[in-house]
Amino acid sequence: MDASITRLDRIRVEARQAAAKYSDINDACPYPWGSPAAIEFKREFAAAREALQAQPPASIPHHHPV
């Protein structure tokens, strides 16, 4: 497999993981701003954040006193 494809896959995985942890791309991106890696990270991060926000919130079970 081409090393650049492997690196691209890794950047995408990192971006999806960061999207679950961070809401701000500036806090999430480990790559130099404006670099090709940062551009791809930002693209994947934004898509992952959008997907996370589209999910309905997890329901919180109501506990009734016994």
Image (tube, rainbow, N blue to C red):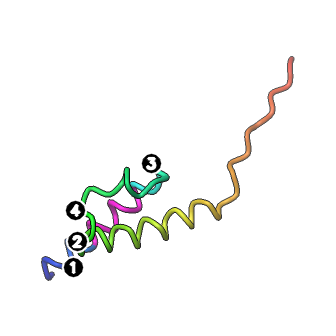
> Mark 2 or mark 1, which has the lower sequence index?
1
**Which residue is drawn at the image coordinates 27% and 64% (left, top)?**
33
User: Nearer the viewer's eye, disc 3 or disc 2?
Assistant: 2
Q: Quote the CA–CA distance across marks 3 and 4.
A: 20 Å
Circle 1 SS class: helix
Q: Position of residue 51 (x, y in %)?
A: 57, 66
Q: Which mark is residue 16?
A: none
- Depth check, front residue: 64 or 55: 55
Q: Amino acid at mark 1?
A: Ile
Return the residue nearer the eye: 30 or 54. Answer: 30
Disc 3, disc 1: CB below 8 Å? no
The reply to whether discs 2 and 4 touch (Cβ–Cβ < 8 Å) is: yes
- Location of the N terminus (image quadrant): bottom left
Residue segment shown in magenta: 9-17
Disc 2 from disc 1: Cα separation: 16 Å
Pick the front one: 54 or 65: 54
Q: Give the quarter of the image for residue 55.
A: bottom right
Q: Pointer 2: residues within 10 angstroms few (<14), some, or many (20+)?
A: few
Cα distance, mark 3 to mark 1? 25 Å
Q: Which residue is mark 1?
A: 5
> Residue beneath label 3, please?
21
Instruction: Tell me which label, 3 or 1, sits earlier in the chain.
Output: 1
Q: Amino acid at mark 3?
A: Lys
Query: How far is disc 1 from disc 4 in space, using C-alphas?
Result: 19 Å
Label 1 or label 4, whichever comes before in sequence order: 1
The secondary element bearing badge 2 is classed as loop
Three-letter code, disc 4: Pro
Residue type (three-letter) at the residue carrying disc 2: Ser
Q: Disc 4 marks which residue?
A: 32
Rounded to the nearest angstrom, the CA distance separating label 2 from label 4 is 6 Å
**Disc 3 secondary structure class:** helix
